[in-house]
Amino acid sequence: RAARQVALLLGCCSAALLRCLGPSFVARSSGGVAADALGLGERSLRLRHSRLARRQAPTCAPEVDLRPADIRRDELHDDDEDEDSFDNPDEGQQEVVQAAIDGKNLFVTGGAGTGKTWVVKEIVRRLQQKYGEDFEEKVAVTGATGTAAVLVGGCTLHSATGVRVPVYARDFKRMGQSLYKNAWGKQIEVLILDEASMVAGEFFDRLEAQMRSMRENDLPFGGVQVILVGDTFQLAPIAEKLDPQVAKNLVVEDLEAGLAVVPTPKGRKKNELHTNRGMIFQGDAFWALSFTIKELQVPHRQRGDKTLADILAKLRLGPGEEGFDEALITLNRECYRGYANQFGGETEEANQVHLVPTIAKASEINRERLNKLPGKSLFFHAEDGVQESSEIPENVTDAVEKLALLEQRRTILKKSTFFKDGDSSCPADKKLELKVGALVMLSRTLKGHLVNGMKGRVLVIIPG
């Protein structure tokens, strides 16, 4: 009986881990070691079958009874804000825009600063002229991330389609529900996706198959024009990692076909996991679209500094490529600034975000910069909680056994490494120290244009 309960627990435990601080934070954790047959890497154990939390945790009161800090949202910098205006595009940009207006499926790539975001905005502007009042119904402007979506005036692909963050293959059927059904099944004629390199091939394939099914059209994406913009030499998709226990119990026959299927009782449909594998160009859908591929090559952002433009072009291709080592040495010599020279001042460098390899190093820099600010620190403490899945297997009918199963799930989740200090899967600190004047960054999208990665400054903390 005990062995049976453990098997049920490990096979059915779906949950979300929540940590709230001021405005509620909702986080999603993923599993640990995945099956070699799926090509998934190793990672420390997080959860058995994780699921995105859709409920916000209640806002918790800080230690000193303060209202949430007033945050001044700094201007969201467009990476291409220094590029030429719409009136002076280069030849490559003009060709891309015209191909989009001609109805071609497009994959637009190029290094940083070559005008990819400019192209998206110009395509959107031209399509607005083409469709007029019907633009919002006919054109879906999306980004792979919240920041990318804001820059092009759209929303995330996951939000626009209703798929959100899929855990199972069946989650893509959410596109066929409610308002999404009419939009994606009939109305939309053009899909624009910025930062496409961050969308996995598996996600793109499932999305394409669902579109064909909904539109009852055998053409790729059901005949919708697809415009992808992004640089596959930059950010890659984030693959899901499976818990070792889940990976060990996957159906062997399906693994041989490249599918991650969780065993289910006889007579029930297969429970296939979505693991977000592969680069977007490694899927079938990418090639089925017969893209017109355009690479933008003129550096606009660094047009006044040819040396820097050449260095970035060499670094883009990665180690092993000709000139990479020399470019890296030159960049470090010319551009590196010691942290000590930047603390405490109002210089441009002092307000920059520094990228470092570890949480410990980031915490060290943050503490040192915070200590340079005048005034007293105030502390906000997070409230941790778990939300176990309420799904009970059909063969568990005894009421006492059901309650015991739920309690076991809660116990496992509460002991998760997710809540440990220094664990990168939780974006909210256990204890947050703030001062007036401190720079802050959003670790998740809140609402509207308050997106993950946006910077701001604490102007005032008002006692409650």
Image (cartoon, grey):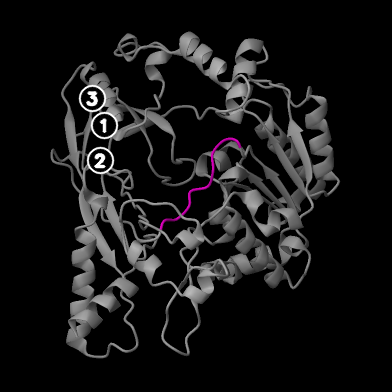
Q: In this view of the protein, can residue 464 be seen by the observer?
A: no
Residue 145 is situated, as x and y percent measured from the top left of the image, at 52, 44
Judged from the image, the secondary structure of the residue bearing numbered disc 2 is loop
Instruction: Identify residue for label 1.
Output: 360
User: Where 255 sits versus 92, above or below?
Assistant: below
For this rendering, which residue is in front, 238 or 54? 238
| Residue appearing at x 20%, y 84% in the figure | 401
| Distance from the alpha carbon under mark 2 to that under mark 1 | 7 Å
For this rendering, which residue is in front, 75 or 253? 253
Give the residues in magenta: 233-241
Instruction: Identify residue for label 3.
Output: 367
Mark 2 nearby-residue class (10 Å; few <14, some 14–19, many ≥20): some
Q: Quadrant of the N terminus?
A: bottom left
| Residue appearing at x 64%, y 39% in the figure | 230
Q: In this view of the protein, can residue 72 be seen by the observer?
A: yes
Mark 3 belongs to which amino acid?
Arg
Q: Earlier in the sequence, mark 2 or mark 1?
A: 1
User: Where 153 sits versus 218, above or below?
Assistant: above
Question: Is 288 on the left or on the right of 275, as rendered?
Answer: right
Q: Earlier in the sequence, mark 3 or mark 2?
A: 3
Instruction: Identify residue for label 2.
Output: 422
Mark 1 belongs to which amino acid?
Ala
